[in-house]
Amino acid sequence: MINLIGEDVNQDMFQNSAIHVKSYGKEVRANRKIGHINVTANDKNSFISAVDEVYSKLNAEPCLNFKA
């Protein structure tokens, strides 16, 4: 799960069917959690590809090394 803090996104931003966006419908404010993204995949390579897509679209870096 990738928390969305201070930034709202929608499902249409992503092409990968493994990416699922949940928006809480809250007003966007700095440091406020307004939703999350879940990534589901059947194998490690598909998972890494989906997570890479999420972070590239969000212009962000993961806080953990998920590729290990």
Image (tube, rainbow, N blue to C red):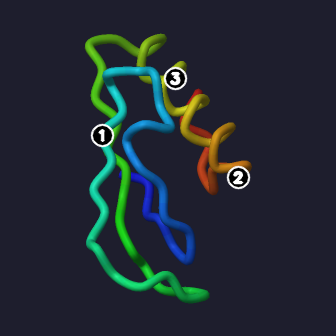
Describe the element under mark 2 as helix, strand or loop: loop
**Residue labelled with disc 2:** 60
Q: Mark 2: give few (<14), some (14-19) or many (20+) Cα within 10 Å.
A: few
Residue type highlighted by circle 3: Ile
Residue type highlighted by circle 2: Ala
Residue type highlighted by circle 1: His
**Residue labelled with disc 3:** 48
On screen, residue 66 above or below 24: above
Q: Residue at x 42, y 78 (%)?
A: 33
Q: Position of residue 18 (x, y in %)?
A: 32, 25
**Residue labelled with disc 1:** 20
Of pointers 1 and 2, the one earlier in the residue sequence: 1
Of pointers 3 and 1, the one earlier in the residue sequence: 1
Distance between the alpha carbons at the discs numbered 3 and 1 = 15 Å
Q: Position of residue 34 (x, y in %)?
A: 39, 75
In the image, 53 versus 41, the foreground residue is 53
